[in-house]
Amino acid sequence: MRASFNLTKERPKIFINLHNAQLKNTILPYVEGITFLSHSSEAEILINQSTPEGCAVEIVNENCEVYLMIKGLVDIAAELGKLEKKKLKLEGDYDRLFKQTQVSGYQKVPEQKKKENEETLAGLEQEIATVGKAIVNFKTFL
């Protein structure tokens, strides 16, 4: 994520937002290593929090996002454009998969595949919501 913002010398703070409180205990022993390897000044664990003001977001999966404090370090308008493109792509992926689940004959699809599709749709919904929140957050910088 640092590379996408051309942050080579800066050591911004990162936030690791988990949507499952049980994951905190899994991640906690690695916070110091994450801080070091990400070239960050600090890594803070959050549980089900919205994007902190001044942060960019990278979605790891439906259970985790990483926020990078970029306020004052990057071109907000350019990043807003990237997020809007990402949201459009996610919405397109969601729409395509949803349409596949609505075609006649979908009932013949194996149950395992139906379950995978439901999980993928739920994950995409979560990612779309997160990107949407990030867009709103970025617009506050303009």
Image: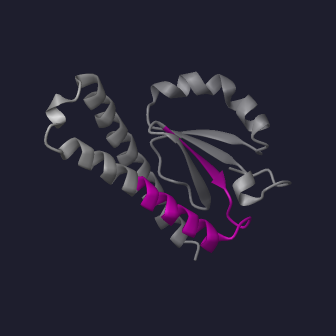
Q: Quadrant of the rendered structure where residue 10 is?
A: bottom right
Task: Name the one closer to the observer, 110 or 6.
Answer: 110
- Say whether residue 101 is left or right of residue 95: left
Task: Name the one closer to the observer, 11 or 101.
Answer: 101
- Say whether residue 14 is left or right of residue 41: left
Report x, y in % for residue 74. 71, 66
Report x, y in % for residue 17. 53, 41
- Say whether residue 3 is left or right of residue 132: right
| Magenta-highlighted residues | 64-90
Q: Most extreme residue toward the right, as rendered?
A: 9
Magenta-span inclusion, residue 20: no
Task: Name the one closer to the observer, 134 or 13.
Answer: 134
Q: Residue at x 15, y 37 (%)?
A: 105
Magenta-span inclusion, residue 85: yes
Report x, y in % for residue 60. 54, 40
Report x, y in % for residue 127. 43, 48
Q: Quadrant of the rendered structure where residue 37 is?
A: top right
Its colouring scheme is: one colour
Q: Quadrant of the rendered structure where residue 45 is?
A: top right
- The C terminus lies in quadrant: bottom right
Q: Residue at x 60, y 27 (%)?
A: 27
- Say whether residue 37 is left or right of residue 104: right
Q: Residue at x 86, y 54 (%)?
A: 9
Task: Name the one closer to the observer, 90 or 53.
Answer: 90
